[in-house]
Amino acid sequence: MKRLYKDARTAPHPRGTVVLLDGRPARTPRRHELAVPSLALARAIAAEWSAQDDTVRPASMPLTRLAATTLDVVAAERARIVDDVAGYAGTDLVCYRAEAPADLVRRQAAQWQPLVDWAMERFDAPLRVTTGIVPVAQPEQALRALRRAVEARDDWRLAALATATAAAGSLVVALALAEGRLSAEDAWHASQLDEAYQIEQWGEDPEAALRRGMLRADIAAARHFLDLLDRNDAGEGPP
C-alpha cells in the first residue's frame, strides 16, 4: 500500500486516544477508527505509521495489527475467540512429553513442569501430563478454570493472549507471558523447546527459520502490546 499521508500523531478520543494521519483518524481494515485505551499504545502505533517509507508494510506494524484485530475481530466475535483460545487447554503443549531421548525428557521436565505447577497454583487448574502423542483427557476442573482465565481478559488483552497462544501453541505459556510469569524470550524458548532440540541435532532449514522468527515476533509483540496497555502516561504532556 502506497503511503499517502505525511504526518502521524495522536489525539484524545471518547474511547481513549486515536491515531491521526494528516489530522484524520486512521482506520482499521473494517473501517473502525484506530482508537485505543492507552496513550502509550497510541503513541507507539503512531510511531509505526511514522516509520513507514513510501510503501506502508503492515507486517512491520505489529501493534497496529493487534489493535485492528481487537477492534475488527475480537469485539465482533468475542465468544468464538474465547472458544478458540480456551480450546488449547485440552491439548496443551506443556502436557505432552517425550519418552526419549533422556536429554530432551530432562529439558521438558525442567522448563514445562514448573509451568504446569504454576497453572495449578495460579488458576486451580490441575493439568495431567503424559508421554507420547496419544491424547490425554484433561480434568473438567482444569478446563473450566483456564477458560475463566481467558474470559476474564478484556477485548484488548484477549487479542494479545490469542496471538501469544497461537504463536506458542500453548495456553499455559501464553497465560504465563500475560501474567508476567515468563518474559517474551522465556515464553518463546519454552514454546520452541522441541524444535530447538531437533535443530541442535540436525540443523535448521531457511523456511523453518523464517517461520520460527515470525512466531518469536508475535510473542514479543503480544507482550509489548500488554505493557503499553498497562502504562500510566499521566503527566507526560500532550499526545
Image (cartoon, rainbow, N blue to C red):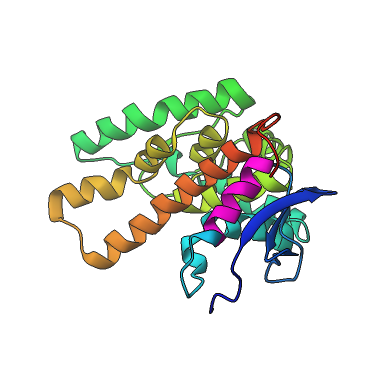
Relative image position of residue 84 (x, y in whole percent): 64, 55
Query: Which residue sits furthest bottom?
Result: 2
Q: Is residue 46 magenta?
A: yes
Q: Which residues are magenta?
A: 39-49
Pick the residue in front: 181 or 84.
Answer: 181
Q: Is residue 152 magenta?
A: no
**Location of residue 212 with respect to 139 vertically, above or below:** below
Q: Report if residue 155 is visible in the image.
A: yes
Quarter of the picture containing the N terminus is bottom right
**Location of residue 68 with respect to 156 vertically, above or below:** below
Residue at position x 26%, y 30% in the image: 106
Residue at position x 50%, y 33% in the image: 128
Residue at position x 65%, y 55% in the image: 9
- Specify the quadrant of the image occupied by residue 98: top left
- Specify the quadrant of the image occupied by residue 103: top left
Relative image position of residue 177 (x, y in whole percent): 51, 36
Q: Report if residue 87 is visible in the image.
A: no
Q: Please name the predominant secondary structure of the magenta segment in the image.
A: helix
Pick the residue in front: 200 or 214.
Answer: 214
